[in-house]
């Protein structure tokens, strides 16, 4: 069963006087252990789609299913719980908190959760992405590639079903981007997580299981690798 | 276990502490505003307390003293033994001291003449404090003399003074007190010295406090003066003291009001700082919300930041105020340690409490605003 499913999703924005239709009836699905890449020109609606998959935004019409459950009408607080337990985020510009160490940044999503101690898992994840010797470094002491690895570890801390990556290699050079993509591919299988990535990066297509092209809010093409 | 480990159990506190540490200058300036506000409130409050305390000391026993003299409608020129006995019944356990007065001239060995008022009294210890010698409970022989008079006449303890043809040995020098009416030339003799006077010129009743003095005054008026008749005239300054107290209370409130204004200004500064820092960190808070941090947790984190500012500023402010208070008490009351009396010390707690309260209040809006920002909007920055 697909872990995330969009069915006929429409998203409209009010922008000044005019109404913009960012998504015009999109169907999408991804399963655990699968990497799906979304490509498309700027303003095509791919970020909007990623926000809806990540439960950061709600669709105007259509249905969002998480693990088969309809979460379309969930309240903001319910969506927060779903994000906390089931979704990890990796952003283009890393978005690490500058005053926390690498380990603390990884633990951040579970920080307020006193029922579980994720400290061991945070260290384990950082070791697995090759940062075992950078545990107590703050983001300013890390390179771009190292920051993105910390961000990936943070996205996986709560053992999510879905990892969303918004231009994960966008701020990295070619070689570093490649190692990040290798890291993601490996963790996708180790952690059995669905990865949905939005990108402009051609090299990403080498690592993906399927590719979705979206233009003007409509999915035009789905290619399986 | 380190401080950081301890803070880990309180994630809001850990995050708040680290956030404040990011921009130390801004944090310091915001806390400084609170420090100044607390100093203003606590110092002005303590200044009021110091003035009040000093006024109470200066006015001394004046308010608890009731003085009775014969009124316009009295049948005789003075107060009788019967009347004094009735006053004793009304006054209860408060000492009732009848006095006779006169005036005389005393001459020093060098021929200098001094005009002195003479008081005949038995319970001298109730009315007079002596700096040398003693003031007996029952003055039956000997005399007390005011310090300035003794100096003028070059008299010492044991020297004789003459009144009405008899000699009295000086056994005490009366200390000049700070209250009203002191400082005159005064000679205190046993009642027997003025035995040619049939009546008492005045009666002094020493009540325990202003309240009892007022009650006794009213009791005396009711007993002796019927209608508009004035058989006796009762004087008591308890009312005056109450007026002064109430004036000082008003003054104190006004001082505190001025102090509060600076704390209001400080909390507006905190509101501004918190609002700026949450706007600056909008994207960051968006990330927190995206990774599943609940709205309430973001709210608590930012409120904790505001509370830290209040606690830090409040503690520093209270510390500085303590110093200011000691200085004021040293200047006004002559004893710096009096600041630790509850009537002034409490203003340190008030100042600190107000600081934390005002900071939390100022943090409320920025915290609410940050917590309720939609993550998708916040992430865009």
Image: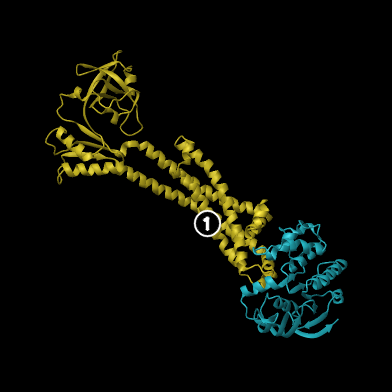
Chain colours: A cyan, B yellow
The quarter of the displayed image where residue A106 is located: bottom right
Quadrant where the C terminus of chain A sits is: bottom right
The quarter of the displayed image where residue B153 is located: top left
**Local crowd size for mark 1, using a 10 Å CA cut-off: few (<14), some (14–19), many (≥20):** some
Query: Which structural element holds mark 1?
Result: helix
Relative side of B67 to B375, left or right? left
Seen at 81% across and 84% down, the residue is A222
What is the chain letter for disc 1?
B
Q: Is residue B142 above or below residue B125?
A: above
Is residue A89 in sight in this rendering?
A: yes
Relative side of B100 to B351, left or right? left
- Residue in the foreground of this view, choosing between B373 and A8: A8
Residue B59 position, x and y percent, is: 35, 37
Seen at 67% across and 81% down, the residue is A69
Q: Is residue B107 above or below residue A188?
A: above
Seen at 39% across and 45% down, the residue is B248
Residue A189 position, x and y percent, is: 81, 73
The number of discs equals 1
- Residue in the foreground of this view, choosing between A25 and B271: A25
Is residue A93 in sight in this rendering?
A: no
- Residue in the foreground of this view, choosing between A204 and B336: A204
Residue assigned mark 1: B357
Residue A78 position, x and y percent, is: 62, 74
Please identify the residue farthest to the top as the structure is shown.
Answer: B110
Quadrant where the N terminus of chain A sits is: bottom right
- Residue in the foreground of this view, choosing between B123 and A136: A136
Residue B375 position, x and y percent, is: 66, 71
């Amino acid at each position: 069963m697909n872990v995330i499913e969009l069915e006929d999703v429409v998203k409209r924005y009010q922008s000044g006087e005019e109404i913009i239709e960012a998504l015009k009836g999109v169907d999408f699905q991804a399963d655990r252990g699968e990497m799906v890449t979304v490509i498309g020109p700027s303003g095509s609606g791919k970020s909007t789609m990623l926000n809806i998959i990540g439960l950061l935004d709600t669709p105007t019409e259509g249905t969002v299913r998480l693990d088969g459950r309809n979460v379309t009408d969930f309240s903001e607080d319910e969506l927060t719980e779903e994000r906390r337990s089931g979704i990890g985020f990796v952003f283009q510009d890393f978005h690490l908190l500058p005053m926390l160490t690498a380990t603390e940044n990884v633990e951040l999503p579970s920080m307020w959760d006193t029922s579980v101690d994720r400290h061991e898992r945070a260290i384990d994840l950082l070791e697995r992405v090759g940062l075992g010797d950078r545990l107590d470094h703050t983001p300013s002491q890390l390179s771009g590639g190292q920051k993105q690895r910390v961000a990936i570890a943070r996205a996986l801390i709560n053992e999510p079903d879905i990892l969303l990556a918004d231009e994960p290699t966008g701020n990295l050079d070619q070689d570093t981007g490649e190692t990040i993509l290798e890291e993601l591919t490996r963790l996708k299988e180790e952690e059995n997580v669905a990865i949905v990535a939005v990108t402009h990066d051609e090299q990403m297509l080498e690592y993906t299981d399927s590719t979705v092209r979206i233009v003007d809010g409509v999915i035009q093409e789905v290619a399986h690798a | 276990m380190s401080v950081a480990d301890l803070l880990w159990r309180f994630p809001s506190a850990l995050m708040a502490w680290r956030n404040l540490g990011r921009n130390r200058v801004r944090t310091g300036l915001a806390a400084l505003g609170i420090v100044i506000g607390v100093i203003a409130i606590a110092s002005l409050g303590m200044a009021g307390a110091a003035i009040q305390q000093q006024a109470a000391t200066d006015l001394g026993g004046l308010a608890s003293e009731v003085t009775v003299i014969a009124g316009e409608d009295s049948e005789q020129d003075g107060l009788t033994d019967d009347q004094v006995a009735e006053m004793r019944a009304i006054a209860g356990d408060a000492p009732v001291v009848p006095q006779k007065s006169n005036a005389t001239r005393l001459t020093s060995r060098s021929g200098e003449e001094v005009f002195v008022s003479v008081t005949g009294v038995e319970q001298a210890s109730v009315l007079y404090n002596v700096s040398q010698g003693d003031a007996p409970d029952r003055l039956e022989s000997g005399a007390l003399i005011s310090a300035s008079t003794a100096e003028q006449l070059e008299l010492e303890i044991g020297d004789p003074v003459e009144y009405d043809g008899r000699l009295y040995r000086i056994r005490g020098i009366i200390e000049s007190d700070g209250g009203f009416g002191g400082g005159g030339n005064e000679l205190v003799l046993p009642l027997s010295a003025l035995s040619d006077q049939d009546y008492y010129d005045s009666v002094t009743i020493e009540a325990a406090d202003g309240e009892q003095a007022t009650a006794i005054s009213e009791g005396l008026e009711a007993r002796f003066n019927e209608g508009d008749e004035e058989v006796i005239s009762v004087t008591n300054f308890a009312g005056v003291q109450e007026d002064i107290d109430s004036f000082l209370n008003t003054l104190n409130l006004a001082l505190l009001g001025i102090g509060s204004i600076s704390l209001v200004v400080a909390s507006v500064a905190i509101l501004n700082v918190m609002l700026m820092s949450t706007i600056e960190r909008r994207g960051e808070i968006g990330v927190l919300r995206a990774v599943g941090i609940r709205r309430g947790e973001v709210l608590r984190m930012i409120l904790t930041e505001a509370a830290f500012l209040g606690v830090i500023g409040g503690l520093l402010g209270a510390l500085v105020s303590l110093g200011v208070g000691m200085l004021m008490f040293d200047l006004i009351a002559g004893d710096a340690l009096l600041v630790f009396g509850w009537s002034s010390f409490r203003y340190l707690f008030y100042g600190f409490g107000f600081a934390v309260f005002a900071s939390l209040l100022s943090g409320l809006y920025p915290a609410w605003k940050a917590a309720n920002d939609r993550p998708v909007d916040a992430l865009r920055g």
